[in-house]
């Protein structure tokens, strides 16, 4: 699924929940800001101190339910049908908005504060449900897209609620909120059922004990707990930044309120874009791959925002939006804001998706409730710290700088805790630059949680790093115990998990089988050692037995290129170079079908043979079999070098690649004079260098060389020529012994026009260079010689 998947908005299993969430977030902010505007510009116009105090009280009353009732909300959401709970909550919202409408009509601050507290309670109960219900209605591949849409809709709802509150009178805001609450309840009626995973567990009504219980529940899973901490920090940083927008604009930038509104619009819209973009990058996969880089970008944006605002020179006092944009440094500030918001959206969505997918289904709502508690707690602490900094004389840009430095620490911690993301990306980038790595068939790799045995040919010490960097996820490698303990392999364990294997311990194979059965992808080198020939070595039975016992598919992976590096065992046998081109081919998975009753030893032997067949088929399937032998010879020259010796006969006069190809070019022009493209031409030559040269000469001209063995006898030679439709034979000059043959031999030889002396030509054939492949044209007419087309 590509992200954002807007088709989810047309499906009943997602659209009603999205609508309910959007309207709820809209009403929260509409009510809060309408009340604050009523106080600031109406009731307490002449008492700004009271208006400021009301803002603090309103924020505290809205946040207080998260501390008091999140634990109860999480337990209740795991105990009853979540769709039913949503309907109860939205029905309560209708009553709350009715109370708020009365408060606006009477201009009663106590009623409005009570409504705000009840809306905080409403959000506290609704919070665990809105995320824990998604895994019950969406597939795992849709979770990222659905979460991205929820987050994008939430921030847009917050923005529009705040903007609308400033555009209409407070009592009209109450009417709008009332109508939207009714619409939200109607939408909640369309949410499909979401029964609890376990409905019989009791609810702990002790607030303190319940809160401690949900926090310990969230702490049980390392990945889930890290996601909770990351989400909490994001909302803490966001709350601090949004709180400082108004003083930043009014004091530091000396601009009007419309500029603060512009900041809010850019921030909200860009977060929505980041939330929807991250799933497109992940392709629907629930992964923290982009969390570290997003955290680093978030920190960099905040730090640079601190510098750009502190160094801003006011050109237009009380600047409007147009005047602010015309000021020097304004676009840098907006760019920093875009970086902060976009990276924040990319940071938060994967963490929420991990929270949903990796939490136990019967504890998911409690984990999300624990996240809400930490969100509120960390936000309160951060606001307190900011208040102390401001009281100590720090400016708003300095506060943003401190926030950026703290975010940088969080980003570095995330890089350390998730090394397979950023570290793996850096290693992959370096390897791709040095070795020009090409990967094909990566879609054939199993998804996380799928059992599989990946078998790879072993060429060099570089193989493990290449596979760890380019195979998806964090695969498990079967590594010899002594190597797993080596100091030099420790840095690369951030790319993959090492599974120590002791070949002398018979329990090692059982441990590997158990690992695969648990849903892991195990990478094994079946040869057990690095090749010393460049081809497949002996393939051991163990990997095939592991796949058979674990009922897992075999995924063949072919490496090509590392054998030419200095890290291979082929030094002195092939021309090595520092950075040869490397290819990684992942073939589709296949299974062994071993049927019948047999002993364990026989079954293991059959599995080993099947594995060897698969490895051999892998080498053939990933080789260039659609080229001619002469093209293969030219490719071999590129790999091994033109001066490398390749052919030697009894005379001990070896031919290099350059001499062999050059000779084939020159002789090919001669042999093409009386033969046709595609014609089968016999070669009856002694076992010397010239035989190989003539063979490649015919290949280079698009002819089919047919090797004839004179020891086969006359009858067999004639039968072979008849079968292969050979009309021309190239041989060495006739010896005296040939003249002693019977007349029958001579008649047969003339019938096939076999003994042909190639005529000398007045001018040598033109040179076309070496190392080229040819496409032969149709035979020439009128006795003219056809010249094969040549491509350099």
Image (cartoon, rainbow, N blue to C red):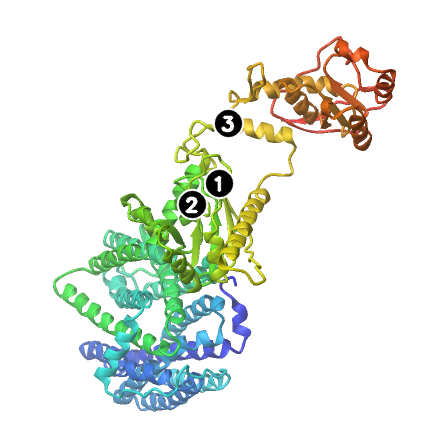
Tell me the crowding category of disc 2: few under 14, some 14 to 19, or many 20 or more residues within 10 angstroms, Cα based.
some
Q: Is residue 331 visible?
A: no
Q: CA distance from mark 3 to mark 1?
A: 21 Å
Q: Quadrant of the C terminus?
A: top right
- Residue 233, percent across and down? 28, 65
Tell me the crowding category of disc 1: few under 14, some 14 to 19, or many 20 or more residues within 10 angstroms, Cα based.
some
The mark nearer the N terminus, 3 or 1, is: 1
- Residue 397, percent across and down? 22, 58
Q: Residue furthest front?
A: 599
Which residue in the structure is indicated by mark 1? 537
Q: Is residue 34 above or below residue 293?
A: below
Residue lying at 43% horizontally and 41% vertically, measured from the top left: 432
Is residue 243 left or right of 513 when viewed as pictured?
A: left
The mark nearer the N terminus, 1 or 2, is: 2
Which residue in the structure is indicated by mark 2? 528
Q: CA distance from mark 1 to mark 2?
A: 9 Å
Tell me the SS state at disc 1.
loop
The mark nearer the N terminus, 3 or 2, is: 2
Q: Nearer the viewer, residue 720 or 769?
A: 720
């Amino acid at each position: 699924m590509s992200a954002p998947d807007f088709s989810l908005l047309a499906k009943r299993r997602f659209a009603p929940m999205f609508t309910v969430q959007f309207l709820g977030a809209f009403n929260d902010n509409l009510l809060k800001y309408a009340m604050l505007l009523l106080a600031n510009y109406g009731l307490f116009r002449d008492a700004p101190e009271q208006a400021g105090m009301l803002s603090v009280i309103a924020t505290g009353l809205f946040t207080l339910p998260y501390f008091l009732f999140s634990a109860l909300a999480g337990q209740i959401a795991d105990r009853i049908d979540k769709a039913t709970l949503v309907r109860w909550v939205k029905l309560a919202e209708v009553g709350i908005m009715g109370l708020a409408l009365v408060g606006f009509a009477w201009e009663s601050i106590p009623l409005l504060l009570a409504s705000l507290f009840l809306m905080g309670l409403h959000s506290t109960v609704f919070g665990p449900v809105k995320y824990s219900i998604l895994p019950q209605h969406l597939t795992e591949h849709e979770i990222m897209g659905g979460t991205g849409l929820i987050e994008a809709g939430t921030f847009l709802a917050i923005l529009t609620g705040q903007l609308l509150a400033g555009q209409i009178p407070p009592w009209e805001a109450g009417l709008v909120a009332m109508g939207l609450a009714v619409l939200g309840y109607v939408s909640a009626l369309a949410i499909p059922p979401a029964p609890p995973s376990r409905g019989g567990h009791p609810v702990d009504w002790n607030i303190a004990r319940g809160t401690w219980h949900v926090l310990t529940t969230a702490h049980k899973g390392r990945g889930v707990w890290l996601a909770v901490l990351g989400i909490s920090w994001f909302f803490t940083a966001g709350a601090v930044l949004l709180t400082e927008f108004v003083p930043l604009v009014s004091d530091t930038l000396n601009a009007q309120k419309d500029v603060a509104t512009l900041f809010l619009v850019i921030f909200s819209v860009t977060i929505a874009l980041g939330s929807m973009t991250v799933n497109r990058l992940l392709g629907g996969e629930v992964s923290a791959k982009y969390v570290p880089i997003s955290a680093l970008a978030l920190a960099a944006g905040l730090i640079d925002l601190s510098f750009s605002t502190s160094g801003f020179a006011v050109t237009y006092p009380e600047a409007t939006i147009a005047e602010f944009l015309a000021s020097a440094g304004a676009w840098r500030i907006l760019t920093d804001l875009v970086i902060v918001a976009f990276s924040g959206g990319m940071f938060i969505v994967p963490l929420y998706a991990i929270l949903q997918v990796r939490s136990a289904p019967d504890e998911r709502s409690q984990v999300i409730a624990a996240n809400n508690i930490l969100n509120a707690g960390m936000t309160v602490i951060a606001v307190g710290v900011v208040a102390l900094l401001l009281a100590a004389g720090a400016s708003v840009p300095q506060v943003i700088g401190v926030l950026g430095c703290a975010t940088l620490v969080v980003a570095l911690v995330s890089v350390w805790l998730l090394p397979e993301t950023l570290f793996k990306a850096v290693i992959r980038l370096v390897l791709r630059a040095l070795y020009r790595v090409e990967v094909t068939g990566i879609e054939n790799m199993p998804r996380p949680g799928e059992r599989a045995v990946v078998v790879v040919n072993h060429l060099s010490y570089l193989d493990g790093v290449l596979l760890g960097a380019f195979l998806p996820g964090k695969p498990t490698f079967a590594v010899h115990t002594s190597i797993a303990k080596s100091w030099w392999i420790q840095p690369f364990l951030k790319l993959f998990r090492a599974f120590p294997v002791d070949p002398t311990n018979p329990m090692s194979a059982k441990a590997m089988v158990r690992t695969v059965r648990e849903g892991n992808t195990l990478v094994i080198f079946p040869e057990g050692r690095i090749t010393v020939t460049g081809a497949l070595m002996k393939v051991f039975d163990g990997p095939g037995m592991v796949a058979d016992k674990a009922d897992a598919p075999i995924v063949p992976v072919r490496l090509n290129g590392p054998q030419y590096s200095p890290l291979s065992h082929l030094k002195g046998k092939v021309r090595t170079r520092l950075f040869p081109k490397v290819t990684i081919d992942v073939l589709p998975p296949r299974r062994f079908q071993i049927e019948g009753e047999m002993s364990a030893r026989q079954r293991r032997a059959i599995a080993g043979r099947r594995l060897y067949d698969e490895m051999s088929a892998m080498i053939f399937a990933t080789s260039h079999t659609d080229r001619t032998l002469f093209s293969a010879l030219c490719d071999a020259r590129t790999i091994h070098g033109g001066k490398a010796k390749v052919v030697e006969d009894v005379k001990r006069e070896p031919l290099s690649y350059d001499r062999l190809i050059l000779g084939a070019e020159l002789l090919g022009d001669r042999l093409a004079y009386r033969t046709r493209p595609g014609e089968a031409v016999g070669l009856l030559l002694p076992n010397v260098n010239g035989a190989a040269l003539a063979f490649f000469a015919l290949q280079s001209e698009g002819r089919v060389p047919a090797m004839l063995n004179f020891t086969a006898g006359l009858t067999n030679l004639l039968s072979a020529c008849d079968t292969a439709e050979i009309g021309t034979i190239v041989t060495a000059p006739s010896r005296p012994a040939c003249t002693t043959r019977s007349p029958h031999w001579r008649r047969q030889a003339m019938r096939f026009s076999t003994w042909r002396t190639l005529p000398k030509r007045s001018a040598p054939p033109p040179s076309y260079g070496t190392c080229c492949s040819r496409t032969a044209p149709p035979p020439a007419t009128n006795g003219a010689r056809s010249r094969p087309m040549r491509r350099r």
